[in-house]
Image (cartoon, rainbow, N blue to C red):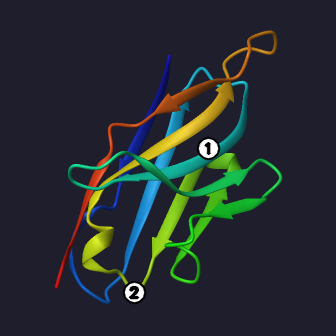
Amino acid sequence: QVQLVESGGGLVQAGGSLRLSCAASGSIFRINGMGWYHQAPGKQRELVAAITTGGNTNYADSAKGRFTISRDAAKNTVYLQMNSLKPEDTGVYCCNAELRERPWAPARDYWGQGTQVTVSS
């Protein structure tokens, strides 16, 4: 069984920074990619940033220039460094991993429980 556990959320003033972490554990053969999604209150979940096994990154326009996604492949961990935070960044940040549990198994998406980020103005 695969688990994704996020940490690093909290309350911060506008202009501040937070660093989120997400560690994947359990039965993992290979991780294809990992990413962070943001769900603001009353809105749908949206991609913030993603990173592939090869290190290619993809960012939402709202995250470009402020957020940086990185990973530690040896630890099956992905990070999201968030700088210059704005009140509209408030919400739950969920970690996603596309991975295979076995060599013969198809890749599947797994999700963490999410970590709350609150940015005060």
> Which of the 4 image quarters holds residue 60?
bottom right
- The residue drawn where x is 50% and y is 65% is 80
Nearer to me, 75 or 70: 70
Question: How many residues crowd mark 1 within 10 Å: few (<14), some (14–19), many (20+)?
Answer: some
Picture disc at residue 84:
2
The answer to whether 4 is drawn above or below residue 60 in the figure is: above
- For this view, does 32 lie left or right of residue 13? right
* Amino acid at the residue labelled 2: Ser
Residue 2 lies left or right of residue 54; in this view the side is left
SS at badge 1: loop
Q: Which mark is residue 76?
A: 1
How far apart are labels 2 and 1 at the CA level?
Answer: 27 Å
Residue drawn 58% across and 77% down? 64
For the C terminus, the quadrant is bottom left
- Residue 7 is situated, as x and y percent measured from the top left of the image, at 35, 54
- Percent across and percent down for residue 114 are 33, 45
**Looking at the image, residue 7 lies above or below residue 1:** below
Say which residue appears at 22% left-offset and 78% top-offset.
12
Circle 2 packing at 10 Å, graded few (<14), some (14-19), many (20+), is some
Left or right position of 67 against 72? left
| Residue type, mark 1 in image | Asn
